Amino acid sequence: MSENKNKLVELRTFTTWLGDDGICYTVVKPNVEIVLEDAMANSAAIKAISSGMVFPLLVNLKAIKTISKEARDHFSMRNRTPGVTAIAMLINSPGSRIIGNFFLGINKPAVPTKLFNDKNKAIEWLKQFANNQ
Amino acid sequence: MAEELDDIYKIVSRITGIKSSGKLTMQAAIIKGLENIEKKTKLIKKDEKKNAKRINEILNVVIALANLKYDKKADVSAKRNDFDALAIGINMLGEELQASTVSLKEKEILLKEIHHRVKNNLQVISSLLNLQSEKITHPGLLEVFTESRNRIRAMALVHEKLYESTDLSRIDFTKYMHSFLIYMDNSYNLNPKEVQLHMDINQKSHYFKIDTAIACGLILNELISNSCKYAFPEKRAGNIYLYFGEDKETKKSNNYILQVSDDGIGIPHSIDHKNTDSLGLQLINMLTKQVEGTLDLDRTNGTKFTIRFSTENN
C-alpha cells in the first residue's frame, strides 16, 4: 500500500489519491456532470489504489454540478469498492448539499457514510475507520 | 444651514464613498449616489424576474412529475446557486420516481393488454358454450346456453370497446350499443319480415365507466332477449323499439333513459316484474339497483321497460 501513497490518479471528473493518514481522497472536479462511466472509472481507481487493503474515503463534492441516476446507483452498490470502510462526503454548495443528502436518503450507501461541511471534522470522523499500516 | 448641509454631506459621502468638500462636488456626489441607487434597483428587478422565471421552470418540472411525466428536466446552470440545487434535487427525484413507478404509457399498455385478454377469455367461454350447445337437442337447455352466451358476449363487448378506446376506463356507450345490436340481430336471427328492430339512439357520444357499461349492456341484453323470446309467439309480426338518450325531464346532465319496448303480446299481468322467479327479470332488477336507477313497466301497448339512471356517482 505504501507505494500507492500520495500517487495522484487523474480522471475526467475526479482526482484521487491515498493520503499518509490512511485515508483515500477523491475530489470532484469543478462543474462536472458525473455519469456512469466516471463512477466506474472512480471505482476502478480506488480498487487499484487499495491493492487489497482497506481504508476510509473522503469525497469532496463541493464543486459538483450534477450526477446521473446510473452513477448514483453505481456508488451505492454493495462491494463496489470492497476496500472502502466508510465514506465522508464534503459539501458546502447548495447543489452538493442536495446531492449528498439525496445520496444518503435515497441511494443508501452500503458502508457508514456521513456529510460534512468541515474537512478537518470529516478526517477526524474517518480516522476511526482507518487501518494505519 | 451649514451644519445641516454638512450632515447631508456626511451621509452622501458614506453612501457613495465619494469624498468632497465643496457644495458642487457634494451635488455631484448626490447625483452619483442616486445613479447608483437606480442602477442597483434595476439589477434587483432584473434578478427578481430571473428568479421568478427559474421558479416557474422548476415548478413546471414538479407538475410534470406529478403527472408521471419523467422526461422533463430542470436546467442546472454553472452558477451552482440555490435554484440549481433545487433543480438538481427535483431532477434526481424524477429519476428515482421513474425507476420505481409504472409510467403512464406502461400503465396504458398494461390496461389495454388486460382488456384484450379479458375480452379474448370471455369470447373463448362464449365459443365453448356455442360448441357445447350444438350437441344439445333439448330446447329449454339450448335456450339456457344461448342466454348465457349472449350475457358473456355483452360483457366481452365492453372490454373490446375499452381495448379499442383511447380512454381505458370509460367507453362510448352509443358505439357499444350499435355493435351490440348488430350482434343481437345475428344471434336471434330475427326475420325482418316478422320482427323489426328499431333503434332511436342519439349519435352523441356518452361515456360510461366499465361497471355502468357492463350493467347497462346486460340490462339491454335481457330486455331485447325477452322481447325476442316472448313477445311474438307463433311467428307473429311486430316491432322492437330501442331508445337510449339523455333524460331531458330531469334537466340534469348525466341522467339517462334506456328504453326497450315491443308491440307484442305483452307480459302476463300475473307476473310482477319486480318480484319474479325469472332469472332475466331478476338480473334486470339487480343491475338497475347497481346503477342506482329506477325500473318502470308500461303494459299499455305490448311491453315497455324504462330504466332511468344517472352516471353522476357511477
Image (cartoon, rainbow, N blue to C red):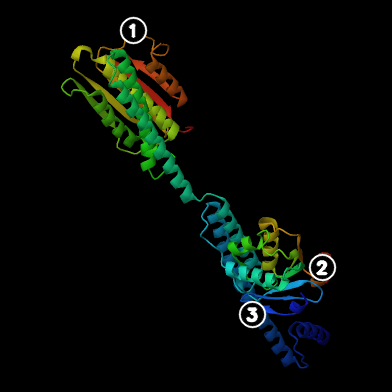
Which label belongs to residue B269?
Answer: 1
Q: Mark 2 lies on which chain?
A: A
> Please, is residue B26 above or below residue B104 in the view?
below
Is residue A90 shown left or right of residue B259? right
Of residues B250 and A88, which is closer to you in this image? A88
> Please, is residue A97 above or below residue A9 in the view?
above
Question: Is disc 2 placed on a helix, strand or loop?
Answer: loop
Instruction: Give the percent coordinates (x, y) of residue B146.
Output: 31, 21
Q: Mark 1 lies on which chain?
A: B
Kind of residue at disc 3: Lys
Query: Do the CB atoms of the residues marked 1 and 3 lie less than 8 Å apart?
Result: no
The quadrant where residue A118 appears: bottom right
User: Gap in Å between the C-alphas at discs 2 and 1?
Assistant: 98 Å
Q: How crowded is mark 3: few (under 14 residues within 10 Å), some or many (20 or more)?
A: few
Q: Which residue is drawn at 71% across and 85% down?
A: B30
Q: Can residue B53 be seen in this view?
A: yes
Q: Earlier in the sequence, mark 1 or mark 3?
A: 3
* Farthest residue, direction left: B193
Q: Mark 3 points at which residue?
A: B39
Instruction: Give the percent coordinates (x, y) of residue B266.
Output: 28, 12
Q: Name the residue under label 2.
A: A131
Question: Is disc 1 placed on a helix, strand or loop?
Answer: loop
Could you tell me which quadrant the N terminus of chain B lies in? bottom right
